[in-house]
Structures are given as C-alpha cells and as structure tokens.
Image (cartoon, rainbow, N blue to C red):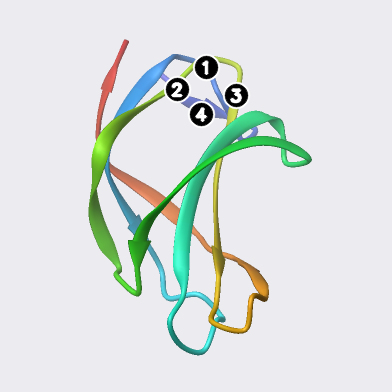
Amino acid sequence: DTIVAAGVLTKAIRIYQIDVTNPSAAVDYEVQIGYGPDLNNMYWFGPVTYNLASVTLPFPLEVPAGQRLAARCRDSAAAQNTVDVKILAYTIE
C-alpha cells in the first residue's frame, strides 16, 4: 500500500521517531514537525529536536489522512530553513 502519494498522506499515521538531515543552518538550529493541507497552512509542533539527526518524539504525532507532512528549522539567527524529514517509526491508524 502507498502511504504517501504526491506528498499527501493517503492514510492516517502515528509518528514516533523521525530523522532529519543536516539542514543549511550553520549552528544551533531547532526542528519543528508539522502537517496541514498545504505548506502555507501548517500546524507546527516542537521544537522536537535541537541539532540532532535522529530523534524519538516526546509524544506520538497523529497525522490525519489527506495531510502533508513537513519539517522546518530555525537557526540561532532566527533564519528559517527547510529540512528533509524521514519517518523512522510509525503505525498506521
């Protein structure tokens, strides 16, 4: 079964652990994870990690079907940067 089609979740999932690749931020960045109907209307959570590549979320993040999942980071200069996020552990609702 396909869980993500064209960037949109086809099933509701509960996320437990994520991996974020090192972003373009120089130092001291915080990562938020979020979901929403599109990238202009996101519900952001976090920060869920600081300067770490892999993190177990302090709470399971429940994402409804039909939503986009995204991550972003902010560095110590308050600049916004995008990050790639991989879901390492999840369950399908």
Instruction: Describe residue 41's horizontal placement relative to residue 5 as left or right.
Output: right
Residue occupying the point 57% across, 33% down: 35
- Cα separation, mark 3 vs mark 2, equals 14 Å
Residue 10: give its label. Answer: 1
Residue that carries the numbered disc 2 in the rendered image: 2
- Cα separation, mark 1 vs mark 4, equals 6 Å
Residue that carries the numbered disc 3 in the rendered image: 67
Verify CB contact (< 8 Å) between mark 4 and mark 2.
yes
Residue that carries the numbered disc 4 in the rendered image: 4
Q: Amino acid at mark 2?
A: Thr
- Cα separation, mark 3 vs mark 4, equals 10 Å
In the depicted structure, whether residue 40 falls above or below residue 25: above
What secondary structure is marked by label 2? loop
Q: Amino acid at mark 1?
A: Thr
- Characterize the local packing of mark 2: few (<14), some (14-19) or many (20 or more) Cα atoms within 10 angstroms: few
The quadrant of the image that shows the C terminus is top left
Label 1 or label 2, whichever comes before in sequence order: 2
